[in-house]
Amino acid sequence: MTTFSDIDRLAISTMRLLAVDAVSKANSGHPGAPLGMAPAAHVLLRNMRMNPKNPGWINRDRFVLSNGHACALLYSMLHLTGYDFSIEDLKSFRQLHSKTPGHPEFELPGVEVTTGPLGQGVCNAVGIAIAQANFAATYNKPEFTLSDSYTYVFLGDGCLQEGVSSEASSLAGHLQLGNLVAIYDDNKITIDGDTKVSFDEDVLKRYEAYGWEVLTVNKGDDDLASIDAAIKQAQKSKDKPTIIKLTTIIGYGSLNEGSHSVHGSPLKADDVKQLKKKFGFDPEQSFVVPQEVYDFYQKSVAQPGAELNAKWDQLFSSFQKRYPEVGKELVRRLSGKLPENWDEKLPRYTPKDSAVATRKLSEMVFEDIYAELPELIGGSADLTPSNLTRWNEAVDFQPTNSGIGNYAGRYIRYGIREHGMGAIMNGISAFGANYKPYGGTFLNFVSYAAGAVRLSALSGHPVIWVATHDSIGLGEDGPTHQPIETLAHFRALPNTSVWRPADGNEVSAAYKSALESKHTPHIIALSRQNLPQLKGSTVENALKGGYVLQEVSNPDIILIGTGSEVSLCVEAAQLLAAKNIKTRIVSMPDTLTFDKQPTEYRLSVLPDRVPIMSVEVLSTAGWSKYAHQSFGLHTFGASGKASDVFKYFDFVPEGVASRAEKTIAFYKGKEVDSPLKTAF
Amino acid sequence: MTTFSDIDRLAISTMRLLAVDAVSKANSGHPGAPLGMAPAAHVLLRNMRMNPKNPGWINRDRFVLSNGHACALLYSMLHLTGYDFSIEDLKSFRQLHSKTPGHPEFELPGVEVTTGPLGQGVCNAVGIAIAQANFAATYNKPEFTLSDSYTYVFLGDGCLQEGVSSEASSLAGHLQLGNLVAIYDDNKITIDGDTKVSFDEDVLKRYEAYGWEVLTVNKGDDDLASIDAAIKQAQKSKDKPTIIKLTTIIGYGSLNEGSHSVHGSPLKADDVKQLKKKFGFDPEQSFVVPQEVYDFYQKSVAQPGAELNAKWDQLFSSFQKRYPEVGKELVRRLSGKLPENWDEKLPRYTPKDSAVATRKLSEMVFEDIYAELPELIGGSADLTPSNLTRWNEAVDFQPTNSGIGNYAGRYIRYGIREHGMGAIMNGISAFGANYKPYGGTFLNFVSYAAGAVRLSALSGHPVIWVATHDSIGLGEDGPTHQPIETLAHFRALPNTSVWRPADGNEVSAAYKSALESKHTPHIIALSRQNLPQLKGSTVENALKGGYVLQEVSNPDIILIGTGSEVSLCVEAAQLLAAKNIKTRIVSMPDTLTFDKQPTEYRLSVLPDRVPIMSVEVLSTAGWSKYAHQSFGLHTFGASGKASDVFKYFDFVPEGVASRAEKTIAFYKGKEVDSPLKTAF
């Protein structure tokens, strides 16, 4: 039973004013939510177990600020409790190269995930809660509770309106994630004004419909005891996530409290002064923290947290003695390492092996490696038999009482929720313990998750998209399903590895790259149709991102293909050879990886003096970095048998060969330089 | 009160078997939902007012199949009721160039919107219902009910799990769209199996929370009277949309009824035979329609519909006599024309006018044209004061009893629901009557709506995205908000016009293009920061998509800029001129429009023999079509004052000038051809 007194109110006022001062100094930012949510933030801190000196402690409670624009509050919380944020950092809020950017970023100490784009944080929190439940079910033993952390998330009306949060919330309710606690800042204000202009649904009823526990705190601005009681009640519910609707006044204390003008603009100077007076602070001072507030947070949060961390370290020590094998596995995972030689399990192929769809080859990789990698946790957005994402012996991640799985299961039925899946995967990855999440859907529908994929790339979460049905090759489902712009889109997104493997060796390479990645999300585009095992392909070569598949001396032309088009290029090369035209064939399963190779290597693949043509049955945007001419698709696809559709768009050997000949003719008599050479 | 008898059951069986036969003949497709939903489809047809001979009748009831994969059912419905779909069309289901593609497409007779990607159709239906409510409120007069149509939509578990449908459903409840009726195919099956693996929320409770009326029909496979009663009940509720939960057995009648195997694969041959026998049909015959079924649909649907249409024509005739001005406006809108000379209201600028942010110039366009274009219906995803999307005198589109608007209002408060907004705009456009919807958000968050934008492009809905805060120029909000890949993404999407106007004249051109477009969605990227009015810019030039802003004889280099980078190029050119380097400056506000210009014109802008460099502070992917070298951004942005951030990334005049010089040096002594010239 927590008691609250003057020191708590002083701490809350301190937190409020730090946030306001940060925004005012930057002359930019959002003071409203910090003023409204500081009481809840303070009470939450008093209920959280965390060690500011060790932000990576695996059993820390997590806090996610889904309404990331309120980060002046978060930075203040982190500073006051002793994370590595100084007062100077607060003063450089929103300045270039500061440690306190305008929206919180994953790598910062105490920041669990990058937020800002609305809806994402609460979904990340669902993912963290999933990982925590799986981790606990996997490693906790009698007398060894290694994992029992909670995941807390603040969110506002914005996040609740975003569809992605509905997806993850519905799944969280189904999964009965009892350690997830959401606090909803019910301030009835959004940028366009009162929420009644567009958002008057019964939020709690909706969350009841999802299977959440719903609680209410009417006076979120100062009723600390009720906030505390709600959090403790939420902690008790073991088979339901909880949402606490916390009614606050946005911009509490400001002359404009309760209005949308305090949402996203600094308070005026006189307003700030009256606010400081109201809270008993000197109106002429800024960034003031009474020493007793620092002391209080040390005594009530930081020190207890450090002690709990130390106790956990001892527990883990004993655990390793008692369970040496599992202990080693845990040590390995906690240090972010994969098992030694795990990749020896990746299958390798020769041209003697039969033609197989790369989505099927992907399934075979899962079968070969799942037992090696306990951190691998897969799933699909309700396309499991199409994506082929589930190994045969998989146990589904489900509440035990469902009868269809348990929390130690490593296959997640995400439902038809691609965007939610992407954001949840970010959370699973953010939990730590080397979790390697993958999620399947059709390549075209990765686009539904663009908001989450972007954050994977920006934050550096190495999640994996198993993206099957990767072109017009999917056939009859037609243009609504056939991706055209998708690879160009994600290749233009920084820090995103977009693999389109051509055969089994390349599929193995894609997964080696994806699973060994520490900071780069991977999208692996896979075919529905069978593709031959290629002569010249090896896992090692494919790991360079691009390589010479088929060499010839003094080539007249170089063809670059990806995925299904590589074998097409091989066939075209045969037609060209019959005309004495010599073709070097390059396979380029991932341009990002290729870009990272030494210049000398890349120029050996794509040298001067030879015309180069890329062949990929999607948009050509981006290929000019590697090719002089590009054969692709710039219209939507068509519904029909795959072979008919390929033929219609001339993606047949003759179509490639004729364009290769035109390319050669185009550059006849001209000296071409490698496209890799640029002016700057 | 509708009565049902043997002929209804015969008709339902006919519809079921036509769908099954279509899938079997194609050896591809989804037989399960058609089998389950045929009874509801039949009962619905008996409650709908439509004229198969006039699919464009503005007061027709609309039907949207949100679970678009069930389109074998839709095509059968359309064929049987007399739309322009022959039996041969059904037989060529899913074949290349047929009229019956694997997912239904907008241009087909009787198909209201393209569906297939889950979640979209129900949102389109919300948009259609919004347009209908606005149209009725605007034009209905006492004794002249020109518009009272209903919008019906089928959807399944898939659509309900997709977050986008939650967004639109929440808004529909708030907007009290009484003429919207959703029928939810509750068959408890998705691709991954029983819905209990991931989706066990209380759907009806959620919809109650949104403010919908919820009804239940337990025996959707054969209780026609209950289905009918529910539909009629739904039609009565005037201030709530309705969802009818209809429990069916997927694949009803098949040996595998109720299992996920009937969802997306053709039934086996023996299964089809037993099904036909079960329904009293000859197991050896396919595509059978008893004449009495054709007659029945003629008598109960087609003829009454034709009569209602004829009555409406007379009513409209009288209306035009009684209200000649409004009548003319309606005739104009129904013929898909804009008012004569409406574009004379578009503002024009000279360099004497002050520098203004293009988002502000956009707002000024709305102020100038909203009164001219009653079909213009705007909104924002809760960023109205940032997007500047609302003209001062606007009336919000709201239920009258809200006290904050009415249905004749033309400004929609979409809430924080970008994807829902995009899909709703598609529906508003699809309603007809020349509706011109636009929706605002930050450019970066158009990506949240990628699924809907893609369908805008695929279907040809000329919706408009007002996409402000278009680069690192937005400053302190930082990398979570600063777009990098966004323009490259949408330029790679076929049939998508991506405008980035540089000044006031170009903004006017963007809106002229967008509003006159019949089939091409527009994304208009606008700055937060002030930009100067450029010397050399005109509306007419900008309408070519790309033009010479600043000419010089015998240029040493050509710089192509867009938006904020055009004035940057102008400044860079001055620095270069001081070194006797002559620069032609090209502004290219929209590459799609430029691509459509005659070759001669395009080559006059980007000729041979001059190195060309593009300058745009986002990804360079796609620029190689127009430039030899490209200065852009390939990393995420940063949080800081805009001027600091531009400087950090070297997007300053010196940064452009130095790269221009490097470009010139790179091509020295070489003959460059225009990038517009390609080998094929």
Image (spheres, coloured by chain):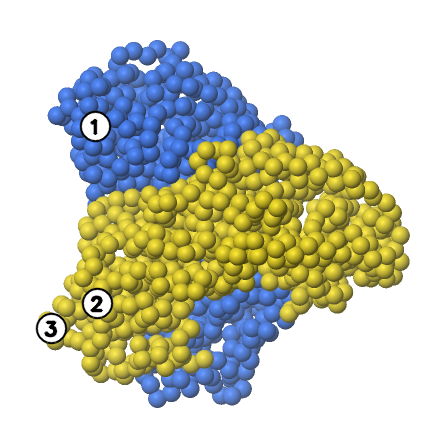
Chain colours: A blue, B yellow
Q: Name the disc covering residue A271, or none.
A: 1
Judged left or right of residue B336, residue B5 is right
Q: What kind of element bears circle 3?
A: loop
Amino acid on which disc 1 is placed: Asp
**Disc 2 to disc 1: CB gap under 8 Å:** no
Judged left or right of residue B579, residue B74 is right
Q: Name the disc covering residue A547, or none.
A: none
Chain where mark 2 sits = B
Q: What kind of element bears circle 1?
A: helix
- Is B462 rendered above or below residue B253? below
| Image location of residue B513, percent across then percent down | 40, 64
Amino acid on which disc 2 is placed: Lys
Chain where mark 3 sits = B
What residue do we see at 33% from left, 85% from top? A670
Q: Which residue was labeled with disc 2?
A: B535
Chain where mark 1 sits = A
Q: What kind of element bears circle 2?
A: loop
Check disc 1: other Cα within 10 Å, few if <14, some if 14-19, many if 20+.
some
Q: Which residue was labeled with disc 3?
A: B579
Q: Tell me the mark number nearer the camera, choosing from 1 and 3.
A: 1
Instruction: Judge by depth and name the residue closer to the eye, A637 or B586.
Output: B586
What residue do we see at 34% from left, 72% from top? B626
